[in-house]
Amino acid sequence: MSGNHFAAWMEGVQHRTETALGTILPEASIAPQRLHEAMRYAALGGGKRVRPLLVHAAGEIAGADPERLDCVACAVELIHAYSLVHDDLPCMDDDVLRRGKPTVHVEYDEATALLVGDALQALAFQTIAEGRVNDDPAVQLQMVTLLGRASGSRGMAGGQAIDLGAVGKQLTREELEFMHIHKTGALIRASVLLGAQCGAPLAPDAQARLDRYGKLVGLLFQVVDDILDAQADTATLGKTAGKDADQNKPTYVTLLGLYEARTLADVLLAEARDAIASFGATAARLDELANFIVHRRF
Amino acid sequence: MSGNHFAAWMEGVQHRTETALGTILPEASIAPQRLHEAMRYAALGGGKRVRPLLVHAAGEIAGADPERLDCVACAVELIHAYSLVHDDLPCMDDDVLRRGKPTVHVEYDEATALLVGDALQALAFQTIAEGRVNDDPAVQLQMVTLLGRASGSRGMAGGQAIDLGAVGKQLTREELEFMHIHKTGALIRASVLLGAQCGAPLAPDAQARLDRYGKLVGLLFQVVDDILDAQADTATLGKTAGKDADQNKPTYVTLLGLYEARTLADVLLAEARDAIASFGATAARLDELANFIVHRRF
């Protein structure tokens, strides 16, 4: 499949995710208006939509219906959006810029940003429980549970807590990996599994290979993020660049150096592609996505 | 049923809720340890457990299994606990005392308190999706959806946002009611419905009467809260007293005066008891609970 086809597919998924999110998020005209306006500000109009792309790409392996994938993609993206709003708050990363726009607490206020995050999380769970994402409600319950685990203290929120505790510390590579497997990895991995769960059930070994892909791509994403953060300027990145190193946070670049970090990215990419090779043509999008994640410039 | 029996039943539910929460919350020895310790600090060892009491009392109407009720009670209480942690943060009510102990951000730090709330919310949804709360997974999905709606921007979080916008304003009684129906009412109402949904399906008119009870008790709870807040001292209340009036927040007492607020509580109590009268003996606990909510001293 050519690069152009992939670019068009990617734009298509980004567009339909934007449309679906716009429908799921309450209109700004509905009370409480300011909260709803701020929720839309936080979740609409930007972002690479990496997690929705993974949901849709994984769905192709299981022949899943695109509308079901939209629903799951929105649930995952709402969790991601909430985590960014809370992560940007003054008591966390204290960031003023996100996707080239003022962060939610800057554009609105801190209390509103707190509630925006809280309400986006609730909406994520409502969305995946309410929509028709699987014919079997028992499987759908497992999907809700998976999203809960990936988001909570032993997933994403736990990763943030480990990150907090790591500021100013020298971490080993194992500790850094443990942090990222939780902080960004858990939700990326869940995106891949949830996308596949929208379709026909996979055999346990196929499920395991897909999970391995998800885990590797989650790490890959973070390694590349660290490389970009070390190199890019703020305008290209759409968020404050060089921030992690400034804040004395351990990154793959500070730990391994730029050259070794790039080598690690290459190795992870090869392993991720290898994990899904046996799926053949149905895994084409997952393969292209892993490649895209390494070669993105923002 | 005598008052003593009710007190023993109440203590029993409070005790089993504490035990069930202790099992559901990850041990403080599991990484990330500090986050897990803070989550346990926030959710264990205190509180009246009004929502679990409502879950169990409503469950008696539908002959629900107590273990299922424990699971739902924990999910609702985890949502409640997260909302308290976030509500106490400096950018919200900036409170230092809760249930007679330092609030989470005072005992730990603000960033940890933020993550504690986020992780407790995720755990709530995981709990209600993962546990066996109904034989029919399709009904269970409806229960997850109901919890999501009650917690989100058109429920509890929305009520908090309306509250933020109301500081220093003169509200009409209708506006005050609209705020409380969301802020505390939505989760209390959901507790009643979710408790009943753990058991045999109710006829639509029985469901409607129970929902009316839940709505009235939610309001009743807030009116009595405002009366207690206006009267009590900090030691009795276990949280900072007189705070709402100090912060120029509208309350039923500032709006109606103490005498009229008490009259309103009496009227709401009579209406709530009336709504469930036709359930007969199975509604005894709900009846006693409404009574308890009015006559509590803390």
Image (cartoon, coloured by chain):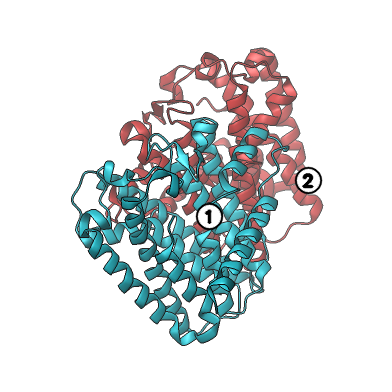
Chain colours: A red, B cyan
* Mark 2 vs 1, N-terminal side: 1
Amino acid on which the number 1 mark rests in the picture? Phe
- State left or right for residue B238 relative to residue A41: right
Quarter of the image for residue B134 reads bottom right
Q: Quadrant of the C terminus of chain B?
A: bottom left
Mark 2 Cα within 10 Å, few/some/many (few <14, many 20+)? few
Instruction: Identify the residue shown where x is 50% and y is 46%.
Output: B99
To which residue does mark 2 refer?
A: A278
The answer for which chain carries disc 2 is: A
Mark 2 lies on a secondary structure that is helix
Q: Nearer the viewer, mark 2 or mark 1?
A: 1
Quarter of the image for residue A230 reads top right
- State left or right for residue A81 relative to residue B68: left
- Vertically, is A13 above or below A93? below
Amino acid on which the number 2 mark rests in the picture? Ser
Q: Is residue A15 visible?
A: no
Instruction: Identify the residue shown where x is 45% and y is 50%.
Output: A16
The answer for which chain carries disc 1 is: A
Q: Position of residue A147 (x, y in %)?
A: 61, 50
Q: What's the distance in space between the residues labelled 2 and 1, CA to CA?
A: 33 Å
Q: Nearer the viewer, residue B54 or A130?
A: B54
To which residue does mark 1 refer?
A: A125
Q: Is residue A210 visible?
A: yes
